[in-house]
Image (cartoon, rainbow, N blue to C red):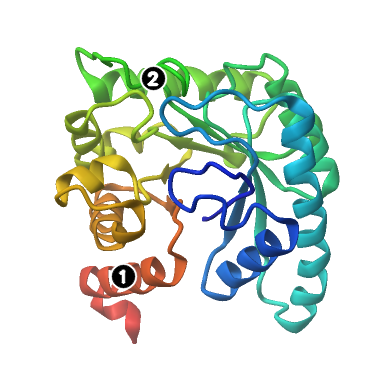
Amino acid sequence: MGIVNVTPDSFSDGGETADRSGAIERGIEMIRAGADIVDIGGESSRPGSNPVPLKEELNRVIPVIEGLRERLVSYKTEYPECTPVISIDTYKAEVARQALGAGADMINDISGGRFDPEMLAVTAQFGAGVCLMHIKGTPRDMQVNPVYNDVVGEVHDYLRTAVERFVAGGVSRDSILVDPGIGFGKTIEHNLILINQLHRLTGLGAGLLLGVSRKMFIGKLTGGLPPSQRVEGTIAANVIGWMSGADIFRVHDVPETVRALKVAQAIRNPLSIA
């Protein structure tokens, strides 16, 4: 899953793809590099961030989704075996509704469907895929002394409840992903425990997405490196995550991650390269 932030204040890319044409080109580049999903977001969820007004978020993401969908029509003609998915990264049901109408295929909701009670209905109405993430608090306050008795167990129960709620509301279990929410209301230790014990989340009957790309804990573990220099740390975390049971990896650096995971998979299963 390649990340396309249509925001001026992303913690990682700092608005590099804040304009429509740049965001669309970034999405196409990621698909060519091996991304199966392009995740488009119009509101930063970095620690301490404030919500973006609905109209502003729509103005950011809808033109990009429409333009990317248009480009993918011709792209599929050139590469018929390629069926990339467009994801809308939002917790607002109205943004999800308009994004799905504009050509998105799935919703990536950092709140697991809890911030907006209409998100379940929108997902079911469109028959869309959805990724349900764990978060403790909100982006504005989530890193203010997060405490758990058993971080993996509590994240597991939160995600299990979210999955069951969406299935009961008419969403196909096969179309649901779960995300432990690395960095969303977790200390460095919480993040490391979750990545190391991802296998405890594989029994939820949903695909498992891991989002660690360039995150703060990687910077702290590598001597305070800025986001642009956290690629190697991100790859290490994703390879361990894959070994622990993750299925999908949400990243800024698609080609590097694709290559690393290909090597890891070949080592674990040498016969697969025949």
Q: Which mark is residue 142?
A: 2
Locate residue 112 relative to residue 12 in the image: left or right: right
The relative height of residue 45 versus residue 236 in the rendered view (above or below) is above
Q: Amino acid at mark 2?
A: Met
Q: Tell me what residue is drawn at x 56 percent, y 67 percent.
A: 30
Q: Is residue 159 above or below residue 192?
A: above
Residue 35: mark in rendering: none
Asked whether 227 or 101 is in front, the reply is: 227
Question: Do tag 1 and tag 2 residues touch (Cβ < 8 Å)?
Answer: no
Residue 161, compared with residue 39, is above or below; it is: above
| Mark 1 or mark 2: whose residue is earlier in sequence | 2
Q: Nearer the viewer, residue 58 or 153?
A: 58
SS label for mark 2: loop
Amino acid of disc 1: Ala
User: SS at mark 1?
Assistant: helix
Q: Position of residue 260 (x, y in %)?
A: 31, 70
Residue at horizontal 29%, vertical 57%?
A: 230
Q: Position of residue 93 (x, y in %)?
A: 73, 25
In the displayed structure, 264 sits above or below 67; it is below
In the rendered view, does 112 fall on the left or right side of 228?
A: right
Residue designated by label 1 = 260
* Location of residue 138 in the rendering, given as x and y in whole percent from the top left corner: 47, 18
Q: Residue at x 33, y 44 (%)?
A: 215
Residue 100 in the image: x percent, y percent?
78, 41
Between tags 1 and 2, which lies in front? 2
- Mark 1 and mark 2: Cα distance apart in space: 31 Å
**Residue for point 41% across, 18% down:** 158
The quarter of the picture where residue 156 lies is top left
